[in-house]
Image: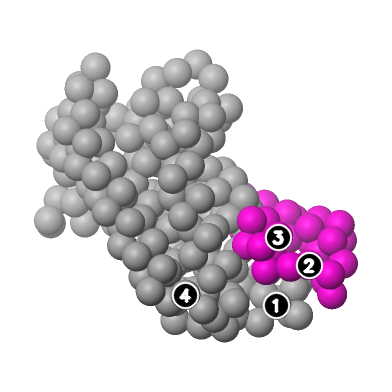
Amino acid sequence: MKSYLAVAYKDLQIELRNRYSISTALLFTLISSTIVNFSIPTESISPTVYTGMLWAVMFFASMTGMSRAFISEEEKGTTLLLKLLTTPLSVFFGKFIYNVAFSLLINFSSAVMFQIFFDTIEVGSVLLFVLVIFSGSIGIASSSTIIGAIISRANVKGALFPILSLPILIPILMVGIESTTFSILGKNSEIILNDIALILAYSGLLVVVSSLLFEFVWRD
């Protein structure tokens, strides 16, 4: 666990020093929220449209920032140093912890911005809404770690990340949109809790499978 946190702390320090990924993702969220606000009248937006647009912004904002988790290692030439100093599992779970933290920051920022721009939408169950965003953030991070390692070796890096991530994340996006809509409407709490459990179970499966495959990708 110490080595996992050391890798995550290293990435966090680097990000806080240059703030490239965070600034890019937050700027994308702000611009997207503004465009959606200008395109759809605030008084006529429905909870379903609101939720769909929110998850679309969350997905692409996360893809914008988390795609550099391994690309930055390749660009700076620190990949070999990591291979020498630590184990593949330490690198994987360290990157995963960092991606979860990054995804939580971006997704909750997106939710806050949407609430500011679309103040006519009132969340019926705030706690369940927060839990859905929290579980969805873990789900997005669970696929992004292994995909980031794979595309870091490709020639066209940025374009491949969302293309490869979307098919894996479709179940999480579909369940997340449904449960977020129900939390806004303030009903079907049992279905929401089942959806959250499903997202976390699917995320756990992705983490287990990805951790088993990561060593082959990392050593290649």
Q: Are marks 1 and 2 in contact (CB under 8 Å)?
A: yes
Q: Residue at x 53, y 66 (%)?
A: 180
Ranked by sequence position, the earlier of labels 4 and 2 is: 2
Q: Residue at x 87, y 67 (%)?
A: 41
Please tell me whether mark 4 or mark 3 is closer to you in this view: 4
- 124 sits to left or right of 115: left
Q: Quadrant of the C terminus?
A: top left
Ranked by sequence position, the earlier of labels 1 and 3 is: 3
The amino acid at mark 1 is: Ile
- The location of residue 53, given as percent across then percent down, is 67, 56
- On residue 49, the disc is 3
Q: CA distance from mark 1 to mark 2?
A: 8 Å
Q: Secondary structure at mark 4?
A: loop
- The location of residue 194, given as percent across then percent down, is 34, 65
The amino acid at mark 4 is: Asn
- On residue 45, the disc is 2
Q: CA distance from mark 1 to mark 3?
A: 11 Å
